[in-house]
Amino acid sequence: EAQVTQNPRYLITVTGKKLTVTCSQNMNHEYMSWYRQDPGLGLRQIYYSMNVEVTDKGDVPEGYKVSRKEKRNFPLILESPSPNQTSLYFCASNGPGYNEQFFGPGTRLTVL
Amino acid sequence: AQSVTQPDIHITVSEGASLELRCNYSYGATPYLFWYVQSPGQGLQLLLKYFSGDTLVQGIKGFEAEFKRSQSSFNLRKPSVHWSDAAEYFCAVGAKDSNYQLIWGAGTKLIIKP
Protein backbone atom coordinates (compact mmCIF):
# COMPACT_ATOMS: atom_id res chain seq x y z
CA GLU A 1 0.00 0.00 0.00
CA ALA A 2 1.28 3.41 -1.00
CA GLN A 3 1.73 5.48 2.10
CA VAL A 4 3.61 8.07 4.08
CA THR A 5 4.37 7.11 7.65
CA GLN A 6 5.36 9.36 10.53
CA ASN A 7 6.61 8.54 13.98
CA PRO A 8 5.77 9.25 16.66
CA ARG A 9 2.12 10.19 16.26
CA TYR A 10 2.06 11.99 19.59
CA LEU A 11 4.91 13.48 21.55
CA ILE A 12 5.10 15.55 24.71
CA THR A 13 8.50 16.95 25.54
CA VAL A 14 10.17 19.74 27.43
CA THR A 15 11.90 22.87 26.24
CA GLY A 16 15.39 22.28 24.93
CA LYS A 17 15.29 18.50 24.61
CA LYS A 18 16.30 17.54 21.09
CA LEU A 19 13.82 15.43 19.15
CA THR A 20 13.40 13.88 15.73
CA VAL A 21 10.19 13.10 13.92
CA THR A 22 10.68 10.47 11.25
CA CYS A 23 8.98 10.39 7.87
CA SER A 24 9.14 7.62 5.33
CA GLN A 25 7.40 7.05 1.99
CA ASN A 26 7.25 3.91 -0.14
CA MET A 27 6.28 5.49 -3.47
CA ASN A 28 9.78 6.36 -4.70
CA HIS A 29 8.79 10.03 -4.71
CA GLU A 30 11.47 12.62 -5.24
CA TYR A 31 9.67 15.54 -3.60
CA MET A 32 9.02 15.56 0.13
CA SER A 33 8.06 18.31 2.52
CA TRP A 34 7.20 19.11 6.10
CA TYR A 35 4.30 21.29 7.19
CA ARG A 36 2.99 22.54 10.47
CA GLN A 37 -0.70 23.12 10.99
CA ASP A 38 -1.97 25.65 13.49
CA PRO A 39 -5.60 26.71 14.01
CA GLY A 40 -6.59 29.54 11.71
CA LEU A 41 -3.30 29.46 9.84
CA GLY A 42 -3.76 26.45 7.57
CA LEU A 43 -0.63 24.58 6.56
CA ARG A 44 2.71 26.31 6.50
CA GLN A 45 5.67 24.67 4.85
CA ILE A 46 8.74 24.23 7.02
CA TYR A 47 11.23 22.59 4.65
CA TYR A 48 11.09 20.71 1.40
CA SER A 49 13.37 18.44 -0.56
CA MET A 50 13.46 18.04 -4.31
CA ASN A 51 15.65 14.93 -4.13
CA VAL A 52 18.35 13.20 -2.12
CA GLU A 53 20.78 15.71 -0.58
CA VAL A 54 18.69 18.61 -1.91
CA THR A 55 16.74 20.51 0.72
CA ASP A 56 15.44 24.06 0.96
CA LYS A 57 13.62 26.30 3.39
CA GLY A 58 9.91 26.77 3.24
CA ASP A 59 7.96 29.58 4.85
CA VAL A 60 8.70 28.86 8.53
CA PRO A 61 12.09 27.10 8.82
CA GLU A 62 13.38 28.74 12.01
CA GLY A 63 14.09 26.24 14.75
CA TYR A 64 13.95 23.20 12.47
CA LYS A 65 16.44 21.09 10.55
CA VAL A 66 15.97 18.34 7.98
CA SER A 67 18.10 15.86 6.12
CA ARG A 68 17.57 13.74 3.01
CA LYS A 69 20.17 11.02 2.90
CA GLU A 70 17.88 8.48 1.29
CA LYS A 71 14.99 8.97 -1.10
CA ARG A 72 12.42 7.39 1.17
CA ASN A 73 13.25 9.19 4.44
CA PHE A 74 12.95 12.84 5.39
CA PRO A 75 13.32 13.35 9.16
CA LEU A 76 12.45 16.61 10.90
CA ILE A 77 14.79 17.62 13.69
CA LEU A 78 14.12 20.09 16.47
CA GLU A 79 17.49 20.76 18.09
CA SER A 80 16.12 22.83 20.95
CA PRO A 81 12.34 22.77 20.96
CA SER A 82 10.39 25.70 22.37
CA PRO A 83 6.72 26.02 23.33
CA ASN A 84 5.92 27.96 20.15
CA GLN A 85 6.73 24.80 18.22
CA THR A 86 3.75 23.06 19.78
CA SER A 87 1.78 22.13 16.69
CA LEU A 88 0.48 19.40 14.41
CA TYR A 89 3.14 18.34 11.90
CA PHE A 90 2.58 16.67 8.55
CA CYS A 91 5.03 15.08 6.19
CA ALA A 92 4.07 14.84 2.52
CA SER A 93 5.52 13.44 -0.68
CA ASN A 94 4.68 13.61 -4.35
CA GLY A 95 6.03 12.64 -7.71
CA PRO A 96 7.19 15.01 -10.45
CA GLY A 97 5.19 18.12 -11.12
CA TYR A 98 2.04 19.10 -9.33
CA ASN A 99 0.78 15.64 -8.79
CA GLU A 100 -1.18 14.74 -5.69
CA GLN A 101 0.67 15.24 -2.45
CA PHE A 102 0.36 12.25 -0.17
CA PHE A 103 0.23 13.16 3.47
CA GLY A 104 1.28 11.25 6.53
CA PRO A 105 -1.17 10.89 9.45
CA GLY A 106 0.40 13.74 11.40
CA THR A 107 2.45 14.12 14.57
CA ARG A 108 1.00 16.13 17.40
CA LEU A 109 3.84 17.73 19.31
CA THR A 110 3.53 19.48 22.64
CA VAL A 111 6.53 21.34 24.06
CA LEU A 112 6.21 22.24 27.72
CA ALA B 1 1.90 38.95 -2.28
CA GLN B 2 0.62 35.49 -3.05
CA SER B 3 -2.28 34.43 -0.87
CA VAL B 4 -5.24 32.12 -0.61
CA THR B 5 -8.38 33.15 1.24
CA GLN B 6 -11.09 30.91 2.52
CA PRO B 7 -13.56 33.45 3.90
CA ASP B 8 -15.60 31.00 5.97
CA ILE B 9 -13.95 29.51 9.05
CA HIS B 10 -16.99 27.34 9.77
CA ILE B 11 -19.99 26.35 7.68
CA THR B 12 -23.00 24.42 8.97
CA VAL B 13 -25.35 22.68 6.56
CA SER B 14 -28.10 20.17 6.96
CA GLU B 15 -27.59 16.65 5.71
CA GLY B 16 -28.91 16.43 2.16
CA ALA B 17 -28.49 20.15 1.50
CA SER B 18 -26.17 21.59 -1.10
CA LEU B 19 -22.75 22.95 -0.23
CA GLU B 20 -20.46 25.62 -1.58
CA LEU B 21 -17.09 26.41 0.00
CA ARG B 22 -15.36 29.53 -1.19
CA CYS B 23 -11.74 29.98 -2.18
CA ASN B 24 -10.15 33.12 -3.57
CA TYR B 25 -6.54 33.49 -4.53
CA SER B 26 -4.07 36.16 -5.36
CA TYR B 27 -1.32 34.85 -7.60
CA GLY B 28 0.66 36.45 -10.36
CA ALA B 29 1.24 33.36 -12.46
CA THR B 30 -1.21 30.92 -14.01
CA PRO B 31 -2.41 28.99 -10.97
CA TYR B 32 -2.65 25.32 -10.31
CA LEU B 33 -5.56 24.85 -7.92
CA PHE B 34 -6.33 22.15 -5.41
CA TRP B 35 -8.90 21.18 -2.81
CA TYR B 36 -7.91 18.83 0.01
CA VAL B 37 -10.02 17.37 2.80
CA GLN B 38 -8.89 16.55 6.32
CA SER B 39 -11.12 14.23 8.30
CA PRO B 40 -10.82 14.39 12.09
CA GLY B 41 -7.50 12.93 13.24
CA GLN B 42 -6.41 12.19 9.70
CA GLY B 43 -3.95 13.52 7.18
CA LEU B 44 -5.05 15.42 4.10
CA GLN B 45 -6.51 13.80 1.01
CA LEU B 46 -6.78 15.33 -2.45
CA LEU B 47 -10.37 15.95 -3.56
CA LEU B 48 -9.69 17.50 -6.96
CA LYS B 49 -7.31 19.71 -8.89
CA TYR B 50 -7.32 22.12 -11.81
CA PHE B 51 -4.37 22.65 -14.10
CA SER B 52 -5.94 23.74 -17.40
CA GLY B 53 -8.81 23.03 -19.77
CA ASP B 54 -12.42 22.65 -18.67
CA THR B 55 -12.96 25.03 -15.78
CA LEU B 56 -15.43 22.70 -14.07
CA VAL B 57 -13.57 19.80 -12.53
CA GLN B 58 -14.94 16.69 -10.92
CA GLY B 59 -13.38 15.10 -7.90
CA ILE B 60 -13.83 12.23 -5.55
CA LYS B 61 -16.75 11.77 -3.16
CA GLY B 62 -19.15 13.67 -5.44
CA PHE B 63 -17.37 17.03 -5.18
CA GLU B 64 -16.78 19.46 -8.01
CA ALA B 65 -15.12 22.85 -8.30
CA GLU B 66 -15.24 25.66 -10.80
CA PHE B 67 -12.32 27.87 -11.73
CA LYS B 68 -13.32 31.44 -12.48
CA ARG B 69 -10.31 33.43 -13.64
CA SER B 70 -12.17 36.74 -13.68
CA GLN B 71 -13.09 36.33 -10.02
CA SER B 72 -9.84 34.61 -8.95
CA SER B 73 -11.97 31.92 -7.38
CA PHE B 74 -12.06 28.15 -7.17
CA ASN B 75 -15.18 27.28 -5.18
CA LEU B 76 -15.95 23.74 -4.11
CA ARG B 77 -19.48 22.38 -4.44
CA LYS B 78 -21.49 19.32 -3.64
CA PRO B 79 -25.19 18.96 -4.47
CA SER B 80 -26.13 16.91 -1.42
CA VAL B 81 -23.91 16.49 1.64
CA HIS B 82 -23.69 13.40 3.79
CA TRP B 83 -22.81 13.24 7.47
CA SER B 84 -19.48 11.68 6.47
CA ASP B 85 -18.53 14.92 4.70
CA ALA B 86 -17.99 16.61 8.07
CA ALA B 87 -14.31 17.58 7.91
CA GLU B 88 -12.01 20.50 7.30
CA TYR B 89 -11.46 21.57 3.72
CA PHE B 90 -8.37 23.32 2.42
CA CYS B 91 -7.83 25.19 -0.81
CA ALA B 92 -4.26 25.42 -2.13
CA VAL B 93 -2.59 27.19 -5.02
CA GLY B 94 0.65 26.55 -6.82
CA ALA B 95 2.35 27.73 -9.96
CA LYS B 96 4.69 26.42 -12.57
CA ASP B 97 8.32 27.11 -11.77
CA SER B 98 7.70 27.54 -8.06
CA ASN B 99 9.41 24.28 -7.02
CA TYR B 100 5.99 22.73 -6.54
CA GLN B 101 5.36 24.75 -3.43
CA LEU B 102 1.75 25.25 -2.48
CA ILE B 103 0.16 28.18 -0.73
CA TRP B 104 -2.63 27.06 1.55
CA GLY B 105 -5.81 28.66 2.74
CA ALA B 106 -6.63 28.60 6.44
CA GLY B 107 -9.32 25.99 5.97
CA THR B 108 -13.10 25.78 6.33
CA LYS B 109 -14.60 23.45 8.89
CA LEU B 110 -17.79 21.82 7.64
CA ILE B 111 -20.38 20.85 10.23
CA ILE B 112 -23.32 18.68 9.20
CA LYS B 113 -26.65 19.01 10.98
CA PRO B 114 -28.72 15.84 11.13
Image (cartoon, rainbow, N blue to C red):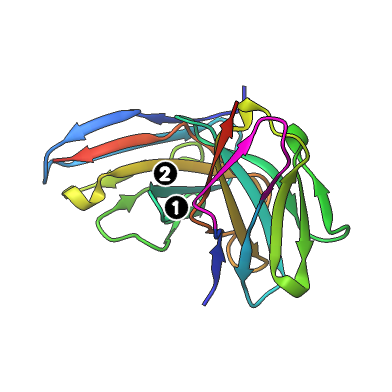
Q: Which mark is residue A53?
A: 1
- Ranked by sequence position, the earlier of labels 2 and 1 is 1
Determine if marks 2 and 1 fall on one subunit.
Answer: yes
Q: Which mark is residue B53?
A: none
The residue positioned 35% from the left and 28% from the top of the image is: A9
Describe residue B101's horizontal placement relative to residue A67 as left or right.
right
Residue occupying the far right of the picture: B54
User: Helix or strand or loop: what does disc 1 sit on?
Assistant: loop
| Snapshot quadrant of residue B13 | top right
Describe residue A50's horizontal placement relative to residue B28 as left or right.
left
The answer to which of A26 and B26 lies nearer the viewer is B26
Residue at label 2? A69
Q: Position of residue A79 (x, y in %)?
A: 19, 48
Q: Amino acid at mark 1?
A: Glu
The residue positioned 48% from the left and 55% from the top of the image is: B106
Do the CB atoms of the residues marked 2 and 1 lie less than 8 Å apart?
Answer: yes
The answer to which of B92 and A15 lies nearer the viewer is B92
Q: Which residues are magenta?
A: B8-20
Q: Amino acid at mark 2?
A: Lys
Disc 2 and disc 1: Cα gap in Å? 6 Å
Question: Is residue B14 within the magenta segment?
Answer: yes
Residue B68 versus residue A74 in the image, above or below: below
Q: Position of residue B105 (x, y in %)?
A: 53, 57
